[in-house]
Image: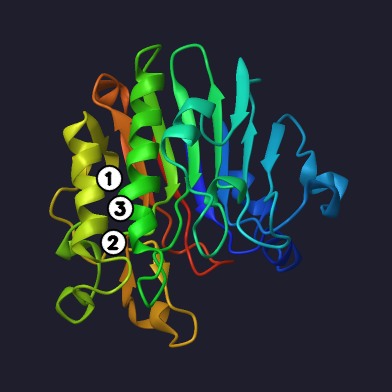
Amino acid sequence: MKIISWNTNGLRATVKQGFFTPLFEEKPDIVCLQETKVEPEQLPDEIKNIPNYYSFFSAPKNKKGYSGVAIYSKEKPISISEGFQKGILKKYNMEKDRYGDPSLEGRMLTAEFKNFFLINVYTPNSKRDLSRLKLREKLWDPAFLEYCKMLQKKKPVIFCGDINVAHTPIDLARPKESEGSHGFTKEEREGIDKIISAGFVDTFRHFYPTETGAYTYWDQLSRARDRNIGWRIDYFFADKKLIGKIKNAGIMSDYYGSDHCPIWIEI
């Protein structure tokens, strides 16, 4: 089984530029998309319904043309669900966030398969002025980890997506200059530490623990991709119970169509 994850930074633009359907030439079993910025009815039928794939979309309930995630799967999931479980939402009340409730922003889809759960997540950005950092540290990150642990009690969990944080200095090109800025704060990085402590494995680092220059996001305005001045902020994490079944993980750094590139794992 091959699973691909990609932040498209606007699915309609990616489609228009001709970069979306070629992704399926990789013959993925599952494709997870983030930042689709689209309502399903805004997509052409041939995109919404890729032949031989079931498709599922989560769009924001409170903002149009923002956020959004999608899953395409050859195998029909046993179940599909949006967002967090109600008990977790009640425990971690995010309604008072100044930008709006992130749990209503179409940021998460969970697909249940026979042997595992797959969570596709687009984690909130802490913002350049760190005005959403407290939300990340105190509410979203702990709520997400609790949700993963809840599912773990039933069967192993894989999650993927744009997590909006570079975990270690080798996960970005300029760690010294970026220290303390959004995406590389102590609080965000500690969120990843807690995920790893809970028994989840960063699959790329499992296979390539010391590789440098391996990035998944580049700033478009500064043409950073041409110089590979990037960040690795897109991940596949897998329950340690599954790590022996994961054959490889990779980054499709030569695939264009977004300010992020796709990533993948093979199970």
Q: Residue placed at 32% from the left, 70% from the top? A: 182
Q: Of the numbered discs in the image, which one, if any, rests on residue 214?
A: 2
Q: Residue placed at 69% from the left, 48% from the top? A: 59
Horizontal side of 100 relative to 192 (left or right) equals: right
- Answer yes or no: do the residues labelled 3 and 2 have beta carbons within 8 Å? no
The type of residue carrying mark 3 is Glu
Horizontal side of 52 relative to 19 (left or right) equals: right
Q: Which residue corresponds to mark 3?
A: 137
Horizontal side of 136 relative to 18 (left or right) equals: left
Q: Position of residue 267 (x, y in %)?
A: 39, 26
- Answer yes or no: do the residues labelled 2 and 1 have beta carbons within 8 Å? yes
Instruction: Report the Cα–Cα distance between label 3 and label 2.
Output: 26 Å
Q: Residue placed at 79% from the left, 47% from the top? A: 40
Q: Nearer the viewer, residue 71 or 123?
A: 123
Question: How many residues crowd around disc 3 within 10 Å: few (fewer than 14), some, or many (20 or more)?
Answer: some
- The tally of labels here is 3
Q: Secondary structure at mark 1?
A: helix
The type of residue carrying mark 1 is Phe
Horizontal side of 91 relative to 242 (left or right) equals: right
Q: Position of residue 150 (x, y in %)?
A: 38, 21
Compare marks 3 and 2 and give the one earlier in the sequence: 3
Instruction: Report the Cα–Cα distance between label 3 and label 1.
Output: 24 Å
Image: 80 above or below 133: above
Q: Of the numbered discs in the image, which one, if any, rests on residue 204?
A: 1
